[in-house]
Amino acid sequence: MTDILKGLNLPLLQDADLNGKVVLVRVDHNVVKKGIIHDPYRIDATIGTLYYINAKGGKIILMTHAGRPKNKKTGEITISDDTSVKPIVDYLENKLHITLKTPEFQAYGTQGYLGIETSVNHLIRDLKENVIDGIYLPNTRWFAGEEAKTDEADRFAYQLAGLADIFVNDAFGSWQAHASTVKVAKYLPSYAGFLMQREIANLDRIYAPERPFVSVVAGSKFDTKVDSLNALLKVSDFLVLGGVIYNAYLCAKYGIGIKGVEEEDIEHAKTFVEFAKAFPGKLIELPYIVESDTMDGKLNGQFRTHNIADLKQGTQLNYVLDVDPTSFHNEQVLKVFSEAKTIFVNAVMGYTPYFNDGTIALDELIDKNVEAVKLYGGGDTMQELKRLLPGLYIVALDSPKYYIFTGGGAVLKAIQEGNVEGLEPIKALVNSAQK
């Protein structure tokens, strides 16, 4: 066990008495897009926890969120096949040769499910009598209480707790303080699953990295990343930006205009530029960017490369959709990546699926450093690595020099907070152990 786990006083799955108990397991199986699983990595990463519970005599009830069925502006919840857990259930049944059942509840218009109904009881009886091997609840975000800010969330969490004897959180990537990740821990003996433990242990390689430590971060909105970028600039030896946040940075620092970059993002980037002045030499600029006249594809004659050193104040560019691969041949960039001992990557450099060259060049350069520990954030970073460099992705899954987190957003949040207890689900587990 690593020092970070010892210091947390985190209740661990291996310390729980599971025999004959119904175990409610929160996982992050959020891998379904429009009814299709594009990468089962986050499902496979939890199988060790599920096998252990089963081997110790536990009866498993699974739950996850999938997609964003709730409209943030109106609060309306849309229940549809696009955000159903059915593809996940089918995958697990085929992979593990088990029988899983999902209960059906009454939907109330655009309010979604108002709670757990008694119809689930017959499935729990079948579970205890070994008629079925597990229960997989519907998408937690189909329930009105999951993301509620009112007593409705506590009521939903209490209903979830009423299904089981023990709660296990194995959903590191689901860091938001929702009913199924945080509040349910108030009502049941609660433990961290093996994936959760592994993710926390690897966070320690970011909190206390072998140096030089290089971070690479990209994204589509500066306001969602600025606090994490500030924190990374403090702890990293070097920070590299990509994506739209790099475009906003270039606009803010050099006074240029880039089509599609919102003024709000530029204002956040200006604040970051000022903040970065206190850390001279840490921010590494990728010198060559790719401008495109259209976002409809990488079309001949409609894209070109610019050296940012040649851009004058007031220059107006069309869409900047990638970092040119020659950026990674730059002497300073090569030196930073080749000498790094720890590299954290939460970045897709180009506009997918058309502009891939920057991401490929980045990942290939990182792989050339055989000594460094490479820590990849989840989500799009992981999916694009698999899509663009499938051979490297397969190697990374088993290499001790690589670790692929299941939740890139959770890693950034943990970095921003400065400690893993800044993540509410982990704090909830620690608090449950102190009761």
Image (spheres, helix red, strand yellow):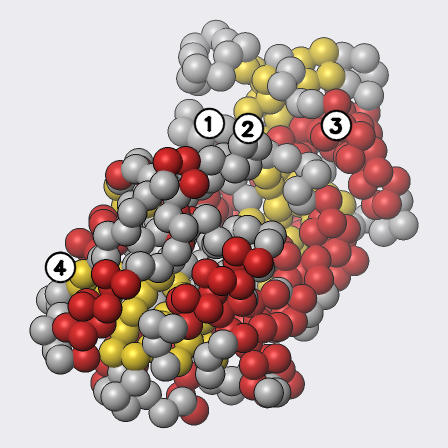
Q: Which residue is mark 2?
A: 322
Identify which amino acid the numbered label 2 is placed on: Asp
Q: What residue is at 49 percent from the left and 17 percent from the top?
A: 295
Residues at marks 3 and 4 touching, judged by CB atoms closer than 8 Å: no
Identify which amino acid the numbered label 3 is placed on: Glu
Specify which label sits upstream in the sequence, 3 or 4. 4
Residues at marks 3 and 2 touching, judged by CB atoms closer than 8 Å: no
Task: Tell me how far mark 2 sits from mark 4, CA to CA.
Answer: 39 Å
Task: Tell me how far mark 2 sits from mark 1, CA to CA.
Answer: 6 Å
The one nearer the camera, 29 or 276, is 29
Q: Which residue is mark 4?
A: 94
Q: Nearer the viewer, mark 2 or mark 4?
A: 4
Secondary structure at badge 4 equals: helix
Residue 270 can be seen, yes or no: yes
Vertical placement of residue 157 versus 286, above or below = below
Specify which label sits upstream in the sequence, 3 or 1. 3
